[in-house]
Image (cartoon, helix red, strand yellow):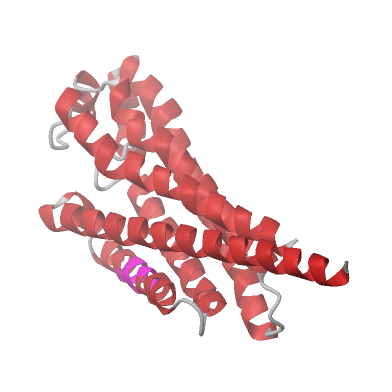
Amino acid sequence: MKSNYNRLISLGALVALIGFLMSGPVAFLIVNLVKPQPEWVSPALFAENYSPIQDLPFYFGFLLIGGMLMLAAGHYLNYNEGNEETKFHLLVALGWTIVFCALISFNYICQTTFVRNLALHYKPEYDTAISTFSMANPMSVCWANEMWGYALLGIATWLMAGYYRDKENVIRLLLVANGIVSLLSAIWTVIDVSWVMTTVGLIAYFVWNVLMIVMMVEIYRSSKKLGVQGKLSHHMQFVTLC
């Protein structure tokens, strides 16, 4: 069974990796080359410049969400080293990841369905709803939700670090680093939510994407290696019994 859960970890890392790449740098380039939104001024200007292509990052974001859920579940299910504290941390990490999935899914559903229809069928009476929920507006409730959602994911990855203790120090440090960065970003958002759309915010976003992409690559490689080792061990046990 352990090798099956290693496959769940590697699959989750792969799906999340695709999500991070496609929803981050790839979608950013496509949107800005095809139909970028100007800097937020008003809901009317947003609707005038809206295109469904601008929702591309959110559609790919669903892959990211699903991958991280598989990753958290795989770590919890695959851990059998007998340390009850680490097992509990992995269970709590899975719980925080589920909350993250719910919060961020709400954001992406708002952008791809609710805000999309308000923009395509724009009327002045929609201004309040667009301002409140569109992530083109740095003061929208969805940005606060987004940053706290990823902060909870950061807590989850921090709690997962114990899984790699005495095994994969690079992965352990990356998991902890994501926790620290994500929590600091959420605190900064409490102080000034509009920072996310500034130059500093965009640089921080791409640095964080690089951190998560490297983390997913390392977790994928580690889980594939452990999966192969598990199969060899099982095969040797079978040969010995025979």
Across and down, in percent, residue 78 comes to 67, 66
The quarter of the image holding the C terminus is: bottom right
Q: Residue at x 47, y 49 (%)?
A: 14
Q: Residue furthest top?
A: 121
Residue toward you, 51 or 175: 175
Residue toward you, 65 or 239: 239
Q: Does the magenta stretch include residue 179?
A: yes
Query: From what the image shows, is residue 181 above or below residue 72?
Result: below
Can residue 5 be seen here? The reply is yes
Q: Which residue is drawn at 52% across and 49% down?
A: 67
Picture mark count: 0
Across and down, in percent, residue 79 comes to 66, 72
> Which quadrant would residue 177 be assigned to in this image?
bottom left
Residue toward you, 189 or 162: 162
Q: Is residue 151 magenta?
A: no
Across and down, in percent, residue 150 comes to 41, 58
> Which quadrant would residue 176 be assigned to in this image?
bottom left
> Which quadrant would residue 34 be assigned to in this image?
top left
Q: Residue at x 40, y 71 (%)?
A: 179
Q: Which residue is drawn at 56% across and 75% down?
A: 163
Side of 51 where 218 appears, left or right: right
Residue toward you, 62 or 132: 62
> Main structural element of the magenta stretch: helix, strand or loop?
helix
Query: From what the image shows, is residue 187 above or below residue 45?
Result: below
Across and down, in percent, residue 155 comes to 47, 70
The quarter of the image holding the N terminus is: bottom right
Magenta residues (range):
178-184
